[in-house]
């Protein structure tokens, strides 16, 4: 296998999408694709997705799966749209997505939502080896940001989603429902930092602190040495205290409400109403 990785950056949401592929067999997977959404107008577009599709086609790749690291709260997933171009592709996510679905089914009062995970094609277990042709993908549960977060290990490359970012950005937040700083500490120190030091880490977002240029690839060794929030020497107590304090100051993601209502449906829009239009629900909180 000749593993190659192509990144795509969406500056509107600071999201990294990846295509991991075997240049010999042409087998491929797509990780965390974006569906553009203008909240002010409700307009959806495929601007972020199009370069991914064009790359797959130009390289004559066969994508087996769209792999979601979790139900994103900051961008809509374009996972279902890949089926319009690659009909055999399947959308996969951690089996614990059902916990997230149940939480937000109640929060948004989504009576139509089936919270059994059946909107997804494949529900993944921790430690499972998923085969995509010549690609062997190990599923590593890395909860904390959400209870259903996983990272994907392909060869020496780990796709970490929102568990851990570039060393100068730290880790994912843990203040979403059923998030846990304690669990995130264990996920990083016991699942990620125990991988070989040379393991490459491809992060889910890059927020480009101090306006630096885009970075998306780091390593286990670099993270253990330089991560500003969770270097290898940091204790669980110190990390949990820092993460909880930091999270209490963070605003909600701008696309939180539409993202969750689409992403817990595996990238499907809410069912159209009698006028043929789909709607996003916004809970109101009177003073």
Image (cartoon, rainbow, N blue to C red):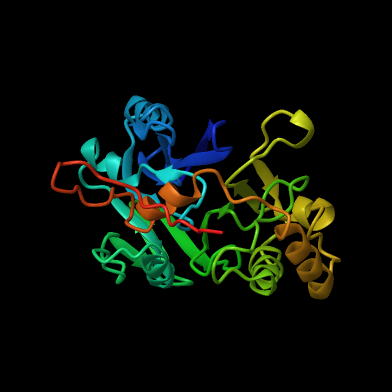
Q: Position of residue 2 (x, y in %)?
A: 48, 42
With 10 as the anchor, is 33 left or right in this view? Answer: left
Question: As displayed, is residue 94 above or below residue 283?
Answer: below
Vertical side of 67 occupied by 24: above or below: above
Residue 102, by quadrant, is: bottom left
Q: How many marks?
A: 0
Identify the residue shown where x is 71% and y is 46%: 166
Residue found at the very far front of the displayed protein: 287
Residue under the point 49% across and 40% down = 17
Judged left or right of residue 18, residue 196 is right
x and y, in percent, of residue 185 in the image:
70, 69
**Any part of residue 134 in sight:** no
Q: Position of residue 138 (x, y in %)?
A: 48, 63
**Horizontal placement of 189 versus 11: left or right?**
right
Foreground pick, 131 / 48: 48
Residue 112 can be seen, yes or no: yes
Q: Position of residue 249 (x, y in %)?
A: 73, 55
Query: Toward the viewer: 269 or 66?
Result: 269
User: Which residue sits furthest left?
Assistant: 274
Give the quadrant of the C terminus.
bottom right
Q: Residue at x 82, y 52 (%)?
A: 228
Q: Nearer the viewer, residue 2 or 163?
A: 163
């Amino acid at each position: 296998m000749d593993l190659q990785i192509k990144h795509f950056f969406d500056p509107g949401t600071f999201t990294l999408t990846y295509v991991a592929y075997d240049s010999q067999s042409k087998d491929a997977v797509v990780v965390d694709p974006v569906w553009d959404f203008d909240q002010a107008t409700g307009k959806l577009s495929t601007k972020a997705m199009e370069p991914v599709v064009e790359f797959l086609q130009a390289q004559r790749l066969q994508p087996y799966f769209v792999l979601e690291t979790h139900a994103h709260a900051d961008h809509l997933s374009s996972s279902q749209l890949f089926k319009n171009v690659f009909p055999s592709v399947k959308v996969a996510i951690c089996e614990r997505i059902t916990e997230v679905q149940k939480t937000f089914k109640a929060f948004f009062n989504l009576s139509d939502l089936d919270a059994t995970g059946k909107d997804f094609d494949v529900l993944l277990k921790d430690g499972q080896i998923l085969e995509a042709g010549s690609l062997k993908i190990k599923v590593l549960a890395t909860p904390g940001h959400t209870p259903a977060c996983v990272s994907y290990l392909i060869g020496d490359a780990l796709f970490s989603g929102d568990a851990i970012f570039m060393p100068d950005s730290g880790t994912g937040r843990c203040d979403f429902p059923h998030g846990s700083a304690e669990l995130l500490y264990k996920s990083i120190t016991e699942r990620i930092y125990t991988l070989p030091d040379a393991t490459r880490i491809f992060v889910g977002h890059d927020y480009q602190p101090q306006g630096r240029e885009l970075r998306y690839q780091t390593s286990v060794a670099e993270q253990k040495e330089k991560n500003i929030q969770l270097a290898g020497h940091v204790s669980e107590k110190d990390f949990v205290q820092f993460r909880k304090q930091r999270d209490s100051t963070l605003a909600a993601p701008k696309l939180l409400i539409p993202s969750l209502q689409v992403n817990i449906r595996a990238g499907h829009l809410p069912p159209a109403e009698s006028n043929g239009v789909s709607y996003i629900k916004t809970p109101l909180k009177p003073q």
